[in-house]
Image: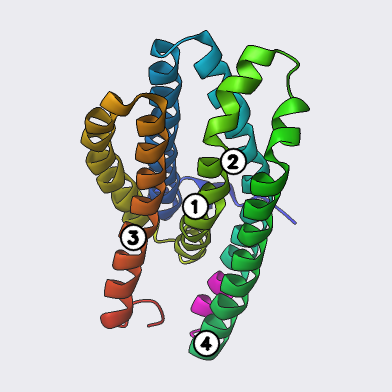
Amino acid sequence: GQIVWAALKCWQAWRPLLAVNRDIFLRSLALQLVFLLITVQGARLGEATVAANALLLNGLLLTAYALDGLAHAVEALCGHAIGARDRDTLRRSLVVACGWSLITSLGFAGLFLLGGHLFIDLQTDIESVRAAAYPYLPYLALLPLIAVWSYLLDGLFIGATRAREMRNAMLVSVVIALPLGVLMSAFGNHGLWLAFLGFMGLRAVTLGWVGWRLQEKGLWVQ
C-alpha cells in the first residue's frame, strides 16, 4: 500500500480520534487521582497501613487482568454489533459478557475470602504488615463483585466510542466520592476502604444510568 500524504493533512478527519483519546485520557487521569489519594491517606495512617493497602490493591490489579480481558472482548464484539446496527448481536454479546464477568468476579471474591491470608503472606514476610492487612481482606473480597460492572460498562462505552459519556461518568463519580472519603476518614483505614468501595460502586451506577439513558433514546444502535 501507499501512504496518502494529502489525507494526513485533513485535520478534520483526525478530530474524532483525538477527541476519543482526550476523553479516555481524562477519565484515566481521574481514576489515577483516586488511587493516589488512597496511597496518600494510607500513608497518613502509618507505614504498616500504607504497605498493607498496597498489597491488598495488588489483588485488584490481579482481578483487573481477568476483568479487562472480558472488557476488551466487549469492546470488540459490541463495537462490531453497534457498527453493524445489529441489536440482537449487541444484546447477546452483553448477556454473555455479563454472565462470564459475574462468574469471574465470584471466583476472585471466593479466592480472596478463603485464601486471602495466603495471598498476603506470599507478598511479604513482615509480620506487622501482614497483621495490618488481614482485617481488610473482606473488603478485598467485595471489591471484584462491585468493580466488575464498571469494567464491563467501560468496555461497552469504549466499543461504542462513547468516551465523552464515560469521562463524564467518571468525573461525577470522583466528585461524589471525594467528600465521601473525607467523611469516612474518621473511621481510619476501614473508612478509606469503604469510601473506595463506594467509589467503585458509583462508577457502575453512573455508567449504568448513562447507558440506560442512551438506551431510552435509542442511541446505542441508530
Question: What segment carries the magenta color?
Answer: 78-86
- Determine whether, in the image, residue 188 is placed left or right of residue 121: left
Q: Amino acid at mark 4?
A: Asp
User: Which structural element holds mark 3?
Assistant: helix
Residue denoted by label 3: 205
Residue at 36%, 66% (x, y): give it.
208
Which labelled disc corresponds to residue 6?
Answer: none
Residue 83: within the magenta? yes
User: Which structural element holds mark 4?
Assistant: loop
Position in image of residue 34 (x %, y %)? 39, 32
Residue denoted by label 4: 86
Asked if the residues shown at circle 3 and circle 2 are in contact, with their CB atoms under 8 angstroms apart, the answer is no
Q: Amino acid at mark 1?
A: Ala
First-in-chain label (3 vs 2):
2
Foreground pick, 204 / 210:
204
Residue denoted by label 1: 147
Disc 4/disc 3 C-alpha distance (Å): 26 Å
- Determine whether, in the image, residue 164 is placed left or right of residue 1: left
